[in-house]
Image (cartoon, rainbow, N blue to C red):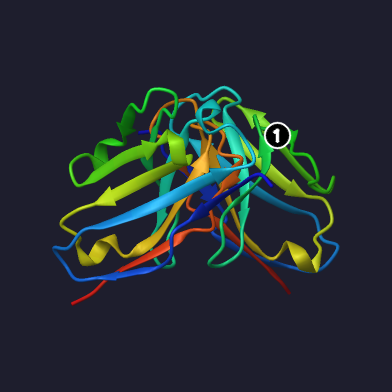
Amino acid sequence: DIQLTQSPSSLSASVGDRVTITCQATQHISHFLNWFYQEPGKAPKLLISDSSNLQTGVPSRFSGSGSGTDFAFTIASLQPEDIGTYFCQQYDDLPLTFGGGTKVEIK
Amino acid sequence: QVQLVQSGSELKKPGASVKISCRASGYHFTTYALIWVRQAPGQGLECLGWINTNTGNPTYAPAFKGRFVFSMDTSLSTAYLHLSDLKVEDTALYFCARGSRTPDLWGQGTLVTVSS
């Protein structure tokens, strides 16, 4: 299985800060990476597909980049409603696998 | 409304079985595959596998072959996850989601608690 390593596992930042989460794959996965947001006890929500494709209705402060083995997810200006956990997920190969998650909190 | 609605929480004893349902509405059921994902308390997401809703053919992640069975009823636009010989470590929130590569629509989750 392809393993995804997310960093950091948690972060605390102030409202308005720029926040970046990284995701590294154990093998080349082209651009086949998605990013999700999850609140505790709720279903994940797809934010970005194909590494950088922002889903309809998702605020433009969210962005994704990368290809191959190294990817990044950025919140340009952190808002209070952004607190929760973010996951990367690869679909280059089955089974689908997810990163360990990054818990984002407000300082 | 386009949605996936899952069955309610379950409390089971070790060794028992459980069947979770996932009903699709607002779109044509057989157009998209459905995947099953679980999340143990405080943990990350694990993909159990997926079912081709056009053919009914299931594909299981290697770690979940054996006690996990995917099935479906096209007439009800519903997919099922059957777990047998439950273990305490199967305690988790189980999700169905639409799409075998990019799951863009998720059910609300079904909590399965296994405890003696």
Q: Which chain carries label 1?
A: A
Nearer to the camera, A16 or B71: B71
A43 left or right of A76 in image:
left
Residue A21 vertical placement versus A40 (above, below)? above
Rendered location of residue A24, percent (x, y): 53, 38
Report the label total: 1
Residue A7 vertical placement versus A3 (above, below)? below
Rendered location of residue B34, percent (x, y): 46, 37
Residue B61 vertical placement versus B5 (above, below)? above
Rendered location of residue A73, percent (x, y): 68, 44
Nearer to the camera, A13 or B64: B64
Q: Which residue lies furthest to the bottom in this view?
A: B116
B113 left or right of A73 in image:
left
Q: Which residue is drawn at 83% across and 49% down?
A: A59
A45 left or right of A15 in image:
left
Residue A90 vertical placement versus A77 (above, below)? above
- Residue B116, by quadrant, is bottom left
Crowdedness near tag 1: few (<14), some (14–19) or many (≥20) residues, C-alpha within 10 Å: some
Q: Which residue is drawn at 33% across and 47% down?
A: B81
Determine the secondary structure under disc 1: strand
Residue A60 seen in the current view = yes
- Residue A60, by quadrant, is top right
Residue type beneath disc 1: Ser
Residue under label 1: A65
Q: Residue at x 53, y 30 (%)?
A: B32
Nearer to the camera, B89 or B9: B9
